[in-house]
Image (cartoon, coloured by chain):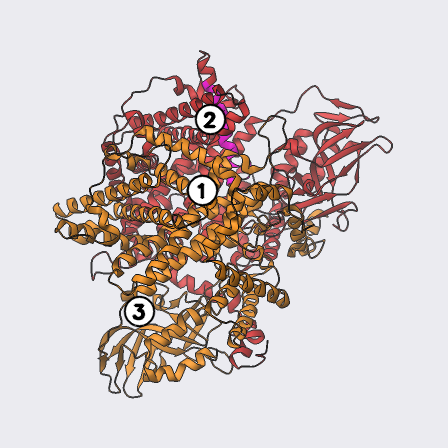
Chain colours: A orange, B red
Amino acid sequence: MGPYVNPDLQKERDGAGFDPENLTLELHGGVERVKTKRAMSAKALADLKVLDIPDFHFLSRTEQYNASMKKAVYFMKKDQNGSFANEEESYFYRNEMFPNENPPIGLQYAMFIPTLESQTSPEQKQRWLKDAKNFKMLGTYAQTEIGHGTHVRGLETTATYDPETEEFVLDSPTLTSIKWWPGSLGKTTNHAIVMADLLSQGKSHGVHPFMVQTRSMETHQPLPGVTIGDIGPKFGYGTIDNGFLKFDHFRIPRENMLMKYARVEKDGTFVKEAKNAKLNYGVMVAVRVGISLTVAAHGLAQACTIAIRYSCVRRQSELKPGGPEPQVLDYQTQQKKLFPLLASTYAYWFTGLQMLAVSNTIRAQIEAGNLHALSSGLKAYTTNGANLGIEACRLACGGHGYSLSSGFPKIYVHATPGATYEGENTVLYLQTARYLQKSVTTAQSGSTLRGSTSYLTENLPNKSAICQKVNIGCAIMAFKYRAMILVQQAAKRMSQLKASGKPHHEAWNLSAVPWVQAAEAHIEFYVVKTFAERISTVKDPATVSVLGHLFQLFACENILKNGKDYLMGGFMSSDQLQMLAEKSLNLLADIRPNAVALVDAFDYSDNMLGSILGRFDGDVYENLYKWAKASPLNKTEVSEAYHKHLRGLIHGQNSKL
Amino acid sequence: MGPYVNPDLQKERDGAGFDPENLTLELHGGVERVKTKRAMSAKALADLKVLDIPDFHFLSRTEQYNASMKKAVYFMKKDQNGSFANEEESYFYRNEMFPNENPPIGLQYAMFIPTLESQTSPEQKQRWLKDAKNFKMLGTYAQTEIGHGTHVRGLETTATYDPETEEFVLDSPTLTSIKWWPGSLGKTTNHAIVMADLLSQGKSHGVHPFMVQTRSMETHQPLPGVTIGDIGPKFGYGTIDNGFLKFDHFRIPRENMLMKYARVEKDGTFVKEAKNAKLNYGVMVAVRVGISLTVAAHGLAQACTIAIRYSCVRRQSELKPGGPEPQVLDYQTQQKKLFPLLASTYAYWFTGLQMLAVSNTIRAQIEAGNLHALSSGLKAYTTNGANLGIEACRLACGGHGYSLSSGFPKIYVHATPGATYEGENTVLYLQTARYLQKSVTTAQSGSTLRGSTSYLTENLPNKSAICQKVNIGCAIMAFKYRAMILVQQAAKRMSQLKASGKPHHEAWNLSAVPWVQAAEAHIEFYVVKTFAERISTVKDPATVSVLGHLFQLFACENILKNGKDYLMGGFMSSDQLQMLAEKSLNLLADIRPNAVALVDAFDYSDNMLGSILGRFDGDVYENLYKWAKASPLNKTEVSEAYHKHLRGLIHGQNSKL
């Protein structure tokens, strides 16, 4: 006999119409990669046991930071000792070790070392890189200020060159210039690459990066002239010390300016190197697609896993009068909450995978603008969807979803900043919109459009042929139609405003809302198309059939959500929408028997989910009770609050105010 | 010179087109009530200073519980000493003292004493009420079990009568029968009214309430046979000890059954009293409307206050190339995020006020079913809206919204359980839907419909006359049309399913999604209508004009959101929708100059908002910096984690694994 599995959950697994392992291989990149994933996951789980880390949810914020540091240092030493054969192994191990947590030294790998590798002179590489890789120098990247976000021109920190001493004087001249938010800046790192406005010979030369030691290598105390600390507790991200940094005329050697693209001579002459620093679109594309995958798709996939498993374990109320309490997932309303989110998860995940593959091949090509516009919008589209979806999953689990033991809160607070970091979502949609607007202008000038916007000049059918079957071609055509219509509307509003005498920037702001809607429609079309393309590469017929249901549900739900746009110009009829509404209800019933297998296929460990409701074995109530009993307030039978406050009330003592 | 106010915020206030004080009086019930509100708020703020409670966000969960207990005991003693002239004074004082917090003894007032007053015999009142009012007995109400929610028939806790000893034996026969969630049950109270299945003479007599002492009056230790504790940390609600309670054949005297409606004789004979316990619809209506007001409307109002003030203080990026950084609220996209939420807040608030007034007059009448259906749906509608809206406000504030100092997380985690407690929202919509379905059946039988569903038999115009002016009558008619159409569609699906041979309960489940949509449309129609009615009672023309813009925006946004429904049957044209879309963009510009005054009118203290971003004086950055410096991780310059973990890494010590 195998280990215990809740019989309701076992029945679901036994009744699935396909083998989830096939889908796991699709999602995680094939047999070899899944093998590595599972091996590294097992290794991390074993190490976690040895490290004896307490339950995350029982820890105060400071304790979360300490616990994560313990794991991070353990991991870094292991990495240093060559325990991982390649980046893939290291990635899967780290993933399992820090489930929905930001380790306090993550930026050493993500920003500090890469910046040293890409923005320094050969001498500087020589000087710093070894220490950075040995973790003697622990660093971060400090750009954002308390009063200034992504708008680099607004940064106020100054680096004034003093030719007398051949030093830069770093200063925070205003309150709003204090560096704010950089990860690991507050308490962990001893160095930071600081972005500051370079002033020399009485003139500003724009914002440049400087290597700044912030803390003593001996004592870890902040250096004189540096005020540094943690920015305080956040919604989540308790394990990382996002920090502040304020300079009071703090001096660094001239040679600490990162000198690959520009430098200052001893006498203060500013020299721009021939090769210009330009935005690396390939990296930006990879980062944003990465967020769509690892933050949005994974966050939503985890939430769906928990909610769907628990909805099979939980029995509640009655469907048939006087009958037994049914599984919650048998309620149509519950299916309607969860299955569209499950479909979105697969859509995000497959689109992300596909785009990553494309970006690797085209990265070097001239498709950069197109890919950049798509990846910006995809990040906005998926993180918005995940934000709403994770919370919808939590709420679908009733009261127990609100307990930290459900795992949802941790998943949500980890995923939700994805909507604001690496480009706030509205700003990103506007980037996509600018590309659309440029495409419209290009088309109007008679040039041919290439890439993702080429449909803007296509002749689309003026009636949708969509019917009960919701076939892929008709569905994709519908999304294409909507994108085209919304782009046209935004462009029209913009040109009307300009014709009425508004300057370009004002016309742009006054049509920004329709442009954002057009960008969202453009991305949704891309997602539908890409989701379908990816499904078409799957071999196993049973798997294809199940994915087909998800695709259809995704299409129906999103057409209905913006139904009015499809009715415009008579492209669809009200009857067609009504038919899709009925179809989508039928699809819920089609998906129902495969729901558990579809979330099992994501292949998350219980450690990763961090959820008692979503346990693989479905042994929910026993473990909820165990968890509650272990929680901090139950350490003593009688609480401190009783002795300090309640006792006097009950016994009428100290009752004078 | 007055105290400092951020000049950008002052300019907004100086430029408003109406006096927010007029609106404050409308929102808070007139001059006298606002005077009381402000006096009690000032009193509470002064007392809070004396009590010296630390910053909520710097506390661990246990510390939050302790701090709240200190305040609660202080308040209860004050209440006992007759410090408040009436319930209104006490309410406003409590409100300010526990901003978005659940005090750990709140249920003493909300459930324990009221149940003692309504469900006991005269002798029992005599025996218990004085001790409850003196806080000797601290009690709660224990119904929900770990495996059973609102479905009372599913409860498993048993109370078996033993005629030998004339006692009831309380028992938790299964894991799923453990009482779970009741507030203050875990560590605070020493009594609980426990709902259990009464077994006597070998027969079940249904679920009844029993008075159970859970902890020693002397030592506060759990009594033998009682296992009791806190259910562990949650997303929020850190200040209250939601608890679990497990009985192991725990005996209580026969006289501890609450005996107003039923009792057990010494020999075990079960006797039902003539007067039956029936659901008090008046109380349920008041509770649900109360949630719409105090949880949904207030939560969203607070979030809007923070986001709108901060969007005037924050300057970011550029509108005009090379120009200064504009106030974020000048971006059309930012207005589009916030102003529809502001409009919803006013709609919820005014509808809640109106409904509370109506429920007070009709409560005794036969309108109960109608009011119950409306209040259930209103609770679902407003708490769903607030859930999404509060988070949208947070995300509209970029990175800083994610810091606990923004106040959003506390507001959100306090408001969000409103979607699941006192009736999970989908369950509530289905209650509304059942009333709609009954109305349809009534109408089909030829009877006249009264009350809120009478429109179902009206002859509505088949074309909407809505135009650029969005006049009130046309807007209301549109929402009425949509509600009627959706009710008809759901009813049609249901009767088709029944005609095809499905039994009623199955047809109901298979049309539950359309029924929920119909219920939501019915409530939205009611909200629009009631919002308009309430505005029509306002006297000051400038205020009426501003509210008119909010009404129009609310109408436009919601029509557009479900645009396809209005196009159905040709009721509206695509051109009309397009016109409303443009109108709604123009309304954003109309509302812009009054936005700050519209949130000032809510009249929240800084203590209530708990937000540095939303401070009345707009002195955001200085105070963010101050707050960060005071946060726990900054207590020492060098963290514990450095000494324990980091030092070894940096200096290459202890590097063996």
- Which of pointers 2 and 1 indicates the residue nearer the eye? 1
Quadrant assignment for the C terminus of chain B: bottom right
Disc 2 packing (10 Å; few <14; some 14–19; many ≥20): few
Please tell me if label 3 and label 1 are on a single chain: yes
Q: Which residues are magenta?
A: B419-440
Give the secondary structure at mark 2. helix
Q: Quadrant of residue A323?
A: top right
Earlier in the chain: of badge 3 and badge 1, it is 3
For residue A545, which numbered disc appears in the image?
A: 1
Give the secondary structure at mark 3. loop
Q: Name the residue rendered at 32%, 56% in the picture.
A: A376
Q: Is residue B417 left or right of residue A565?
A: right
Please tell me if label 2 and label 1 are on a single chain: no
Give the labeled residue for mark 3: A156
Q: Main secondary structure of the magenta part?
A: helix
- Amino acid found under the numbered disc labelled 1: Ser
- Amino acid found under the numbered disc labelled 2: Val
View extreme (right): residue: B164
Q: Is residue A605 at least partly visible in the picture?
A: yes
Q: Is residue B359 at least partly visible in the picture?
A: no
Whether residue B429 appears in magenta in the rendering, the answer is: yes
View extreme (top): residue: B446
A155 is higher (above) or lower (below) than B122: below
Please state the horizontal and vertical placement of residue B291, each as a whole percent of the image: 50, 37
